[in-house]
Structures are given as structure tokens and as C-alpha cells.
Image (cartoon, helix red, strand yellow):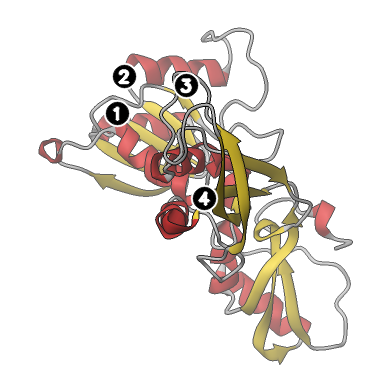
Amino acid sequence: IELLFLFKLKKKMGYRIQDILSFLDQLAPPAYQESYDNATLICGDRNWPLTGVICTLDCTEAVVEEAIQQGANLIVAHHPMIFGGVKQITPNDGTGQLIIKSIQNNISIYAIHTNLDNMLDGVNGKMAAMLGLSKCSVLLPKPGILKKLITFIPEAQVEQVRNALFLAGAGQIGQYSECSFSSSGQGTFKAGADTTPFVGSEGVRHTEKEVKLEMIYPGYLEAALLMALKNSHPYEEVAYDLMALGNTYKGLGAGIIGELATPMMADQFLRQLAEVFKTPVVRHTTLLSQPIQKVALCGGAGSFLIET
């Protein structure tokens, strides 16, 4: 069964496809997808009025037909129909047929794939919850996500800038929010011609008591943070540094590892797997004779995680 659920919205509510996509982009930012992936709007128009949403694992002909019959013009699929470059879209292949049919019927198709897999509370998190795992953490945290913003603010305006940056999403470290570090010092500048300095005078070097403010943030938020910084900062020219960090982002990455509340033998655990995921077959290696308590899982092939 490929159709997971259908949710029809009344046209009078005035939703547009963009409203759904904006929510999904916040839930699992496209910047978190793997390099080979294509989690994005595959076809259609974000600005179309929304008439209904179908969610599915794969966008197949049956799903497109269901959307047409139900009057739903947005399909949200886990797997993208297109991964690599496409040189032609014709009815001579399955993907081309689906894209043509979707466009002809004003249906948008959106994929939310490895970006959703990589979230701690995404696909893997749901699987872990179904198995009753606790103390869950990402098995292989994703590097190269975190950055640091450093800026310099007059003492009296520090809190307004700090709060604006927090509101824009900066300062999250694990389960802790509103994390920052500040230190006091003195800044100097000389305002040039045609400037309107917040403090000091044109053509005269000015020394101001300032606070150096530092915050960590995920890279995809950078544009929003810089906008919040410039809108809340009193200076005409805002001084800031952006630094890439080697820290891993513990809430993001491949797979999940967690613990069962009560250890169980391998055969008992396999029976639970079959029951929870409603599958008649579970493939496994030779069973060990020791109880299972710590479990690693991945909602995909996952072979690259075995060593970890």
C-alpha cells in the first residue's frame, strides 16, 4: 500500500502549496540532505492554491491517479522521482510519463528524503519510538553543519541583538537553547564622508565600549541570522565574523542508537520487529545467544553504518 494518507483541505481556507512546503522545509531543511539526493519540489508551482495533499513512500502512477480522482494537487513523497540530471522528459519512460501527467493535471510533487532521514525525530526517530527505544541519539552525527557568528555591539544594545539572533534560530546546542558567550572590550572606528554614525563624529576616530557576542548556528540559517543581525544592530556598518566549525551536529545524521527498557533474546526481538512493522519476513544473520538491549537502526540500506 503506497498511499499512506490523504488529507483534503477546503479551498475557502486559502492555503497555497508554499504553506505546506515552508512547514516541511522547517521540519527537515533541504540543506540537510545528502549530496546525491534531490529533496525538493520536483515539478509544479509553489504558488498554486492548495486543494489537497497525498503523502506516499514513492510517487507512482497509482498515486498520481489517486491525486487526480481526489482533487489533491500536492504529492509529498519520501523518495524523489529524479535523482540525477535529466536530459529529456518524454512519455517513453516511466518517470517522464508521471511528470507529464502531473503537469497536465496541475499536480506538484515534492520529495523529502535524506533530510528527513537525518533528523533525530525523523524517519529513524519514528522507527525507534515504535520499537520502544529510549536514550536515543544519532548513530553517525553529520559534520560540517555548524558555524559560529561573532559580532561586536555597543553595551546598551547587546540584549536586543542577542534576542533577535535567538529568535532567528541561533544558540542551539543539543537540548539547550539560547546559548551564547559575550566578553567586553573596546572598539575603534572613524566615520568617513557621507556616513551617519550611531556614535562618534565624521572624520574623528571614536572609541566605544563594546561587547563581543558569539553564537553557534546551523549553516542553513545564515541568511536569516544576518538579516536579524543587521535589522537589530544600531551601527550603520555591522562588523561580524562567520566561522565554519569542525563540531558534529549531534541532533543530525545517519541512523539512531537506543536502548530497550528490558533486554530480550534475539528470537523474541525478531518477533517484535515483525509485529511492530507488520512484515511477514525478517532477514537476519546468525542469531547470537546473548540478550539484546542496545539497538542501532536505519530507515534505509544502512550498510555504511555497520562499522559505527
User: Mark on residue 210?
Assistant: none
Q: Are marks 2 and 3 in contact (CB under 8 Å)?
A: no
- Residue sitting at x 80%, y 88%: 291
Q: Can the viewer see residue 254 in this picture?
A: yes
Quarter of the image with the C terminus in it = bottom right
Q: Amino acid at mark 3?
A: Leu
Residue on which disc 1 sits = 68
Q: Amino acid at mark 2?
A: Asn
Residue on which disc 4 sits = 153
Q: Amino acid at mark 1?
A: Ile
Q: Secondary structure at mark 4?
A: strand
Q: Are marks 4 and 1 in contact (CB under 8 Å)?
A: no
* Place of residue 41 in the rendered image (x, y in percent of width and height, measured from the top left): 47, 29
Q: Which is more toward the observer, 272 or 112? A: 112
Q: Residue furthest left?
A: 12
Q: Residue furthest bottom?
A: 262
Mark 4 closeness class: few <14, some 14–19, many ≥20 residues within 10 Å: many
